[in-house]
């Protein structure tokens, strides 16, 4: 991955406006241009207090399952990052049957295969972090878009400032294909999240260190026993954040690390998703049927792949 220098003649104000990668997605949020975009721009400006040219080397772990087109778009965002350190990309592939592995290798990523039968959320992340060559690790998924060209710098700067920083995370805004409900919901808590400056958290709320866009220290991850694989259905990221705080480490809430991430949830699926998130406060066993029941994007992906397979066999 290429390294970039931030032109010294640019002011932080200019950079904040220029470095948004997907302003059109902010327009889908009610009052998105007036409130959300303005707040996100301010957050980006704040990150430029620290020079991106001083960013440390980073390992970026992406989890993927049959998402070649989305993975390609994520690589486009990664290539646009203004980041001073070297970026190692590791793709944890869950035995995809599409072109996901081909896309990953085309972009120079290292591919680690996790058999479908062994998949759980914490297992996939532990496999990715284990393969990382650097102490600083960014965790995400293939169906995410980075909100700005300073996403990675926004998190990394907290680790260069303090050896005691163990984790950093942002929030999620709607991506392409977000439902009406998801777009309206983004005008609430996620926009309020952006209204706060970067700060160390004192306790973990729901979604803390969410691995759609979180940065961790591999050293601390290893010291604290890695992601707890008892949380097979999720919640292992927030559980690790709690251990970090208990051990005296710093976990940073960084609004400029915000990503675009949606599942296309209608009202019924949104209720299921919220109940699932509440349930992940405690360890739960992996159940693919329950995941499919609340995720319309996964159901659509499965149907599309089945149709493609049928067409291939008939031709």
Image: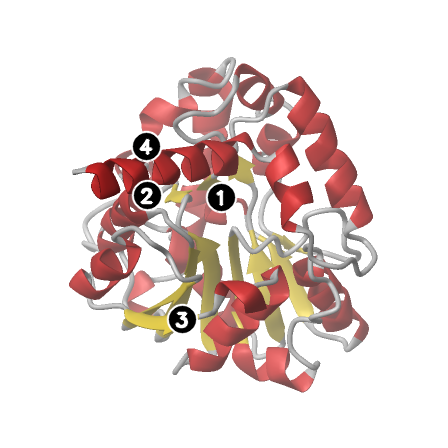
- Mark 4 lies on residue: 22
Measure how far apart labels 1 and 3 are at the Cα level: 28 Å
Q: Position of residue 115 (x, y in %)?
A: 48, 69
Viewer-nearest of discs 4 and 3: 3
Q: From this viewpoint, which residue is outermost toward the front?
A: 314
Give neighbour class at mark 2: few <14, some 14-19, many 20+ (Cα, 10 Å).
some
- Mark 1 lies on residue: 258
Residue at figure coordinates x 66%, y 86% from the top left: 223
Q: Earlier in the sequence, mark 4 or mark 1?
A: 4
Indicate left or right for 298 with 142 as reference: right
- Mark 2 lies on residue: 70
Indicate left or right for 139 with 165 as reference: left
Viewer-nearest of discs 1 and 2: 2
Measure how far apart labels 4 and 1 are at the Cα level: 12 Å
Viewer-nearest of discs 4 and 2: 2
Marks 4 & 3, CB-CB < 8 Å contact: no
């Amino acid at each position: 991955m290429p390294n970039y220098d931030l032109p010294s003649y640019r002011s932080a104000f200019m950079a904040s406006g220029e470095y948004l990668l997907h302003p059109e997605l902010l327009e889908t949020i009610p009052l998105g241009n007036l409130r959300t975009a303005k707040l996100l721009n301010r957050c980006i400006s704040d990150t430029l207090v620290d020079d991106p040219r001083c960013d440390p080397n980073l390992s970026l772990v992406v989890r993927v399952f049959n998402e070649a087109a989305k993975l390609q778009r994520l690589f486009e965002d990664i290539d646009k990052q203004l980041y001073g350190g070297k970026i190692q990309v590791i793709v944890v592939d869950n035995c995809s049957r599409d072109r996901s592995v081909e896309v990953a290798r085309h972009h120079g990523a290292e591919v680690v295969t996790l058999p479908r039968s062994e998949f759980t959320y914490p297992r996939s992340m532990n496999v990715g972090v284990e393969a990382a060559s650097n102490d600083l690790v960014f965790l995400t998924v293939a169906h995410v878009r980075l909100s700005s060209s300073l996403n990675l710098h926004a998190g990394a700067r907290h680790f260069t400032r303090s050896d005691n920083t163990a984790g950093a995370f942002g929030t999620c805004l709607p991506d392409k294909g977000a439902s009406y409900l998801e777009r309206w919901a983004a005008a609430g808590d996620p926009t309020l999240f952006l209204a706060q400056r970067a700060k160390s958290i004192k306790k973990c709320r729901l979604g803390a260190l969410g691995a759609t866009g979180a940065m961790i220290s591999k050293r601390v991850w290893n010291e604290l026993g890695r992601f707890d694989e008892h949380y097979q259905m999720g919640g292992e990221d927030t559980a690790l954040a709690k251990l970090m705080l208990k051990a005296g480490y710093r976990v940073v809430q960084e609004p400029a690390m915000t990503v675009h991430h949606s599942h296309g949830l209608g009202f019924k699926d949104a209720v299921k998703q919220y109940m699932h998130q509440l349930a992940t406060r405690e360890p739960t066993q992996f159940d693919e049927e329950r995941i499919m029941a609340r995720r319309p994007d996964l159901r659509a992906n499965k149907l599309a792949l089945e149709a493609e397979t049928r067409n291939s066999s008939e031709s």
